[in-house]
Every structure is written in C-alpha cells, then in structure tokens.
Image: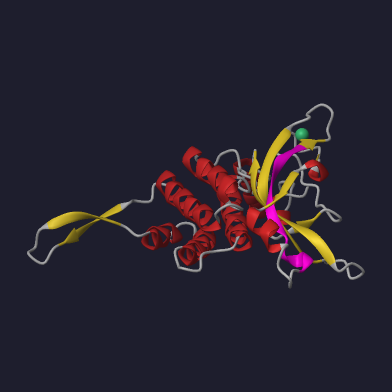
Amino acid sequence: MVGVEAFTDWVEFETWPAPGCPTCGAGFLSGEDKLDKVETARSVSWRKEEAWEPDWIHGVLSGHLTCNNERCGEFVVVGGTWCVGDSRDPYQQYAERLTLRFFHPPLQFIRIPEKTPDETARAIRDASSLLLANPSAAANRLRQGIEALLTAKKVKRFTIATRRNGSTFRDRLTLHARIEILRKSEKDVADLLEAVKWIGNDGSHESGLTAREVLVGARIMEAALYRLFESRDPEMERIVRKIIKNKGIRKRT
Ligand SMILES: [Zn+2]
C-alpha cells in the first residue's frame, strides 16, 4: 500500500501515486483531478512580465480525496501547493507538480505494535500528521515518543548530582544517557533508538530536516518497537529453548 512516503517529494497528475486509505487500509484514494487548484496573486501578476515562462506559474491547492472501497468511502482532506516545472516524462516539457503538505486523516506512516505504550503511540500519530507540513516538528514528537518509551521501560529520568558546595539536587538525564541505561539490557534496541535520536538532533539545527529524513527515523523507531513488543513471543521462546535443550523436537530417550 502506498503510504505517506510517496508524498515526501512532489507528484504529478500523470503518475498519481494513489495512496492507500488510512481508514480501511483496503481501498485507495483518488479524486486528485477534482482538487481545487488556484494560482497565487503573485503568479497571476507575473504573467504580465515580458520574460514570463510557464514555469513561473505556482499556486495553492485544497480539496478531498475519496476511498474507492465501496464499503468505506472515506474522505481525506488534503492541502498543499503546486507549480509548473520540468516533467519527469522525457517526452513532455512541463508538468504540474503537486506538493501535498497535509492529509487528514493522515496517510499510513509506520505500524505501531499493539503493546506500544499509549504515550509513545500518541507521539507517533502526531508525528504522522506533522510529517509533510513540518518535518522537524515531527522529528521532535518522535523524540518525545522515545522518552515516553524509556519511561515505560522503567529507565530512570533523573539522577542525583552534587553541587560544588557539596549539596545534592535532582538532575534530569539526557535522552542519550537514558538510552545508555537501556543499552545494558537491550543493546539492539538502544542502537536503533540512538540512531533516531541523532536524526532528531539534526532537526533542531537551522536547516531543519526533510520529510524523507524523518521517515527514515520513524522506520528505525518502528523496528525498535517491533523488537520490544512484537517479535517477542514468550511461548515460542520457551519452545525454542526446549528444542535446543533436547537437541531436537522430540524428547530423546
Ligand atoms: Zn477506505
């Protein structure tokens, strides 16, 4: 199913990447040809310029897409911008490029295992709404999701620090320090979370992050959540231990 990843860059009408419906997960969304597309006032005024070229045209778009699954029929509100630029089609000079910055309900982002702590799941859902509109804000929300995950995993948030005069105070641990604590028991998961943390750090820098970069972080976070909450099957692990102990599925006599 096509998810939000198809919209981290501009798309064309000719090769519309029909996204999967976020509500039913079975149908796909279309109706892109009926979106309301208007030129900005500046784009209209530029048309009077002598040097004007078609690729000066730009504007905003809004409207809704509809799920083609008859039993669902969900409407998804969208908003964004468009412009005329070089086509990806080698036989065509210009194409209308659509940059979608908003989908509601948001398109499929990452899967959240059922046992994920509520606060982490909420942070991921927020990040999915923010991803195209403000990737750095989405990265920041993912970071908060990691903090909540560590709290749920009982990793301490504070340490007792000592001032120069000898008195002590509660000092908040950095995210990095907390991941290091988790590393003692969950090395692989700590590696994954550390990578997401580094991506989040990039988001607080001036240039910000692209939606595609944040999506990489989200995918890594998904892997961490699956490792913690999904791939663990205590019953299966018990069977595995038994097979290893018996050196076979049947008990040796
Ligand atoms: Zn649907």
Q: State the residue in front, 112 or 144.
A: 144
Check the image and report above or below for 163 versus 40: below
In the image, taking residue 83 as reference, residue 68 lies left or right, namely right
Residue at the spot x=7%, y=64% of the render? 165
* Residue 8 seen in the figure: no
Q: Quadrant of residue 34?
A: top right
Check the image and report above or below for 235 versus 88: above
Q: How is the image coloured?
A: secondary structure
Residue at the spot x=45%, y=61% of the render? 183
Q: Quadrant of residue 42?
A: bottom right
Residue 29: give x, y in percent of width and height.
79, 41
Residue at the spot x=44%, y=50% of the render? 144
Check the image and report above or below for 219 versus 208: above
Residue 203: give x, y in percent of width and height.
49, 63
| Figure label count | 0
In the image, taking residue 105 as reference, residue 84 lies left or right, namely right
- Residue at the bottom extreme, as displayed: 51
Q: Which residues are magenta?
A: 53-65
Q: State the residue in front, 117 or 207.
A: 207
Residue 252: give x, y in percent of width and height.
72, 49
Ligand 1: give its quadrant. Answer: top right
Check the image and report above or below for 44 versus 51: above
Residue at the spot x=43%, y=46% of the render? 148
